[in-house]
Image: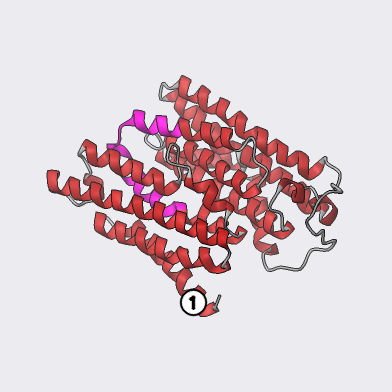
Amino acid sequence: MNPYVLTILLSSLGLGTVLTFASSHWLLAWMGLEINTLAIVPIMAQQHHPRAIEATTKYFLTQATAAAMILFASTTNAWLMGEWEIHQLSHPLATTTVMLALALKLGLAPVHFWLPEVLQGLELTTGLILSTWQKLAPFALMIQVAPTINSSLLVAIGLLSTLVGGWGGLNQTQLRKIMAYSSIAHLGWMVLILQFAPSLTLLSLSLYIIMTSSAFLTLKTNNALTINTLATSWTKSPTLAALAALVLLSLGGLPPLSGFMPKWLILQELTKQGLPLSATLAAMTALLSLYFYLRLCYALTLTIYPNTLTATAPWRLNFTMITLPLSIITILALGLLPLTPAVTAMLAL
């Protein structure tokens, strides 16, 4: 793609997200979401491959449906209540419709079906943008409308997402689909605590973005798209393979890695709020996710190079510009747990 065109598209992507962040009026927020969607569509379709085009079409139709639902809900609220402000969303029909629309935009269960299919058809860099940056604008809206939404609906969507995210990834061999189900599960944890402690949701989102970026950049450096190809990583770069295994365990939420911090704090907060059953169910669904992360770690570190592999096996990694960001993000993805007391003190302020 032409660098000037790419610069314009990435600037528009940033503009759409910032516009949604800064808006207090539903129409302005909707415009931000639309600019965001229209900016990423050409980036997704730049490969000119049938799978990429199919993924782009699915993504566009899904996002357009969600945007139409948001517009319908905000218009309904303005018609019945006379308010266009995001904070003044009060009619039950409008709040439920907006919540479902934002769930569709993010890929939360039970409207998650598009996410694994779309991510599977994209290049890893575009998949990274879709899994991280594209979650910010809908989450900003969700945090603003969360106080008006029925808490039972949020807890149900959160638990269902953690379950679907864990269950869906169990039988996958494609790494991009596994990352998609990982995304669904992590977003479920964030929605679960959204109404009780929004600051914890932001902490979880920040750590999710760090860990997912590290995982995607590692896969891109190794040029790995399937579990079989991932098994060749140890031969190519033992250090990177060892760090990748630790990043995956961090995504699974194992101590003493960074990914344990949000899960620990969320379970603690749910227990404080008198929801021990929800906390127990969430912890049990985390075991499902942990299983497929352990499966990837096993393929990375404990398997012998498969002779039947059809992919090419480069013995030396090409120098790429992503080495420095990868190293910084990997350090953050692995070593933030000791900062938990400081983080909890900041959240309490």
Please name the predominant secondary structure of the magenta segment in the image.
Answer: helix
Give percent across and percent down for residue 301. 80, 43
Magenta-colored span: 135-159
Residue 247 among magenta residues: no
Give percent across and percent down for residue 190. 46, 39
Q: Where 3 sits versus 287, above or below?
A: below
- The image quarter containing residue 89 is top left
Total labels drawn: 1
Residue 154 among magenta residues: yes
* Secondary structure beneath label 1: helix
Q: Residue at horizontal 65%, vertical 57%?
A: 217
Instruction: Work out which quarter of the rendered image holds the N terminus and state it.
Output: bottom right
Residue 309 visible to the viewer: yes
Q: Residue at horizontal 54%, vertical 44%?
A: 183
Residues 81 and 328: in front is: 81
Left or right: residue 140 versus residue 322 is left
| Residue that numbered label 1 is attached to | 5
Residues 41 and 258: in front is: 41
Residues 177 and 274: in front is: 177
Give percent across and percent down for residue 312. 80, 59
Give percent across and percent down for residue 346. 47, 43
- The image quarter containing residue 173 is top right
- The image quarter containing residue 224 is bottom right
Look at label 1 and name its amino acid.
Val
Instruction: Work out which quarter of the rendered image holds the C terminus and state it.
Output: top left
Residue 255 visible to the viewer: no
Q: Residue at horizontal 67%, vertical 51%?
A: 331
